[in-house]
Amino acid sequence: MERTSNQKRTTIRAARRQRGLPAVLLLLAAMAMAIEFVAADKGDPPGGEGVCETEAETKTGARTRPPPRVLLGDTLRDLEDLVSFEEVLLSSGARTPAVAAAVPGGEAIGLTYVRDLVEPGLSSRLVGACDARSGWTVSPQSVDGSATVREASRTSRSCPLIWPQLYLPLLDDPAYASRLDPLREEIGLAWGLTQRFGDLLGVGEETVEPLQLVRYRQGEFYKEHHDHGSYYGADTEQRPWTLLVYLSDAPGGGERGGQTFFRALGGAGGVSVVPRRGDGVLWRNEDAATGELLEEAVHEAVPPEGGTENEHEHEHENASVKYAMNVWIAKKKIMEHMDVSAYRTQ
C-alpha cells in the first residue's frame, strides 16, 4: 500500500537538514588533509569499483557505450528513439551550450537529459580522489541541527569534494600553501567542474554547493526524497535546480536497477532515468515563475543489482556499483561576501 504525501513527509521530514555549512566544510577539509597525508605513500589512487577503464580503453581511448535510456513505466526505451538531442542553452544566462533533450513525461519539472558532461577519465579520477583519502562515509542525516543519525531511507555512502570556492584564495598564501598541497589536484578538478556546471546553468560559482559524489553498492538505495529543504519544513537547502551526473553505467543497461526514479511523473508507473557514464539529468525543484515547491521532483535511487559471474574480470569493473555526483544550485550565494570571479580559468 502506497503512503500518502503527508505520510511520506512525516517519514523523511528529518532528512537533509544541514546547518552551519561553512563550518562543516572546514571540518571535512581538515579531515581530508589528514587522511591525504597518510594515503600519500600508497601509490596511484584506484579508479573505483565500476569506473575503472579497461586495457583496451586505455590504449585506444575508445569505449563501447550503451545508448541513453529511460524507463517509462515498465518499458525500457532508447531515448534517441523518442526525442532528438540538440545543442541548447540550459538557461537564458548560460555561457556554454550542451547537447540535451527533454525526457518524455518529465515536463512538470523540466526533466532534461544532458549528454557528455564528464569524460570517462575524469570520472575515474574523481572516484579515485575519494578512494585515496578514504572519503566515503555513511550519508548523514541531521535531525535537529545537532544530532546525526542513519535513517532507513538511505544506505548509500557519499564523499563531498573539497569546496574550491573556499580554498582557492588560500592556495598561494604561504601560511596555508604547504598544507593544501596534497589537495591541489582535487581542488583543481572540483573547480573546473564547478565552472562548467555554472556556465551550463547560467549561475555564479558562488551558488554552486560542494560537489558530492555518491556510491551505491549492490542492494544499496536512497528512498523517495526531495532535494529542496522546504519539502521538510527547513529553511536551509533552498535549491531551485538539481543536476545529477552519472559516473558509471547502470548494470545491464538499465535492466538490473540503478535508475533514478520519479514516481509522480509520466502517469502510471512513473519515469526512470537510466545512468550512462558521463551523462546527467537536470530538473527543477521549484517553479521558475512562482518559486513554489514542485512536489513532482520527489525521486529515489533504485538499488543496483548484481552482475553475472563472468561479466567482469576486474573488481574495479563491477557493474553492480553505481557512482554519481550531486550538483546542487543554491538560491543565493552560500557565503554572502564570496567572490571567486578572479579565479575563473574557463
Image (spheres, rainbow, N blue to C red):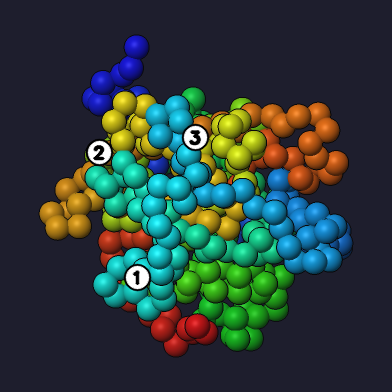
Residue found at x 57% / y 37%: 254
Residue type at tag 1: Leu
Residue furthest to the front: 81
Residue 14 or 156: which is nearer the viewer?
A: 156
Residue 89 circle label: 1
- Callout 3 environment at 10 Å: few (<14), some (14 to 19), or many (20+)? some
Crowding at dot 2, Cα within 10 Å, few <14 / some 14-19 / many 20+, comes out as some
Residue in the picture at 41% in, 73% down? 97
Marks 1 and 2, how far apart at CA:
25 Å
Q: Nearer the viewer, mark 1 or mark 2?
A: 1
Side (left or right) of 152 relative to 249? left
Q: Is residue 237 visible?
A: no
- For marks 1 and 2, the one nearer the N-term is 1
Q: Spatial distance from mark 3 to mark 2, Cα to Cα?
A: 25 Å
Where 127 sits versus 76, above or below? below
Instruction: Determine whether the residue tagged by mark 1 lies in a helix, strand or loop.
Output: loop
Quarter of the image that includes the N terminus: top left
Where residue 299 sits in the image (x, y, percent)? 39, 37
Q: N-terminal of the two: label 3 or label 2?
A: 3
Residue at the spot 76% in from the left edge and 29% down from the top edge: 308
Residue identifier under label 2? 295
Instruction: Nearest to the eye among marks 3 and 2: give it.
Output: 3
107 relative to 32, above or below? above
User: Where does residue 277 sit, x and y in percent of width and height?
Assistant: 60, 53
Which of the marked residues, 3 or 1, is nearer the chain's N terminus? 3
Closer to us: mark 3 or mark 1?
3
* Dot 1 alpha-carbon crowd within 10 angstroms: few under 14, some 14 to 19, many 20 or more: some
How many numbered tags mark residues here? 3
Q: Quadrant of residue 319?
A: top right
Q: Which mark is residue 76?
A: 3
